[in-house]
Amino acid sequence: MKPYDYIIGELISRRKDLKLSQNDLDFKIGCSDGLVQKWETQKRIPSGFMLSCWIDALDCELQIKQR
């Protein structure tokens, strides 16, 4: 599994754990309607800034570690 696929999977799982819809998360991030759905299905790739907003909106943090 590619690292990006893993990150997206974790963000989807966290959103579901928080019982947030994709539209709820769009609103919480402050992005256009349907953007989270496009990110989750990888129809669009978020910029680094928007990825950090997505992670922050789910009250998570991204950790980088050496393999």
Image (spheres, helix red, strand yellow):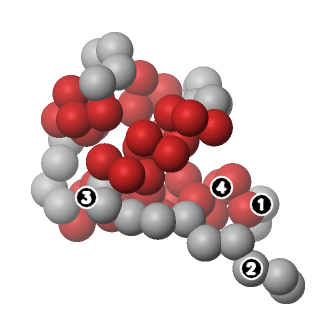
Q: Can see residue 28?
A: yes
Disc 2 element: loop
Q: CA distance from mark 3 to mark 1?
A: 22 Å
The disc, 4 or 2, on the residue closer to the chain's N-terminal end is: 4
Q: Are marks 3 and 1 in contact (CB under 8 Å)?
A: no
Q: Amino acid at mark 3?
A: Lys
In this figure, which residue is indicated by the disc labeled 1?
2
Q: CA distance from mark 2 to mark 1?
A: 15 Å
Residue at (63%, 30%) from the top-left corner? Answer: 47
Q: Residues within 10 Å of mark 2 (few under 14, many from 20)?
A: few
Q: CA distance from mark 1 to mark 4?
A: 5 Å
Q: CA distance from mark 4 to mark 2?
A: 17 Å
Residue 17: % across, % down: 22, 66
Q: Amino acid at mark 4?
A: Asp
Using the image, determine if residue 1 lies above or below residue 15: below
Q: Amino acid at mark 1?
A: Lys
In this figure, which residue is indicated by the disc labeled 4?
5
Q: Residue furthest right?
A: 67
Q: How many marks?
A: 4
Disc 3 element: helix
Using the image, determine if residue 35 lies above or below residue 62: above
Q: Which mark is residue 16?
A: 3
Q: Residues within 10 Å of mark 1 (few under 14, many from 20)?
A: few
Q: Quadrant of residue 31?
A: top left
Q: Which mark is residue 65?
A: 2
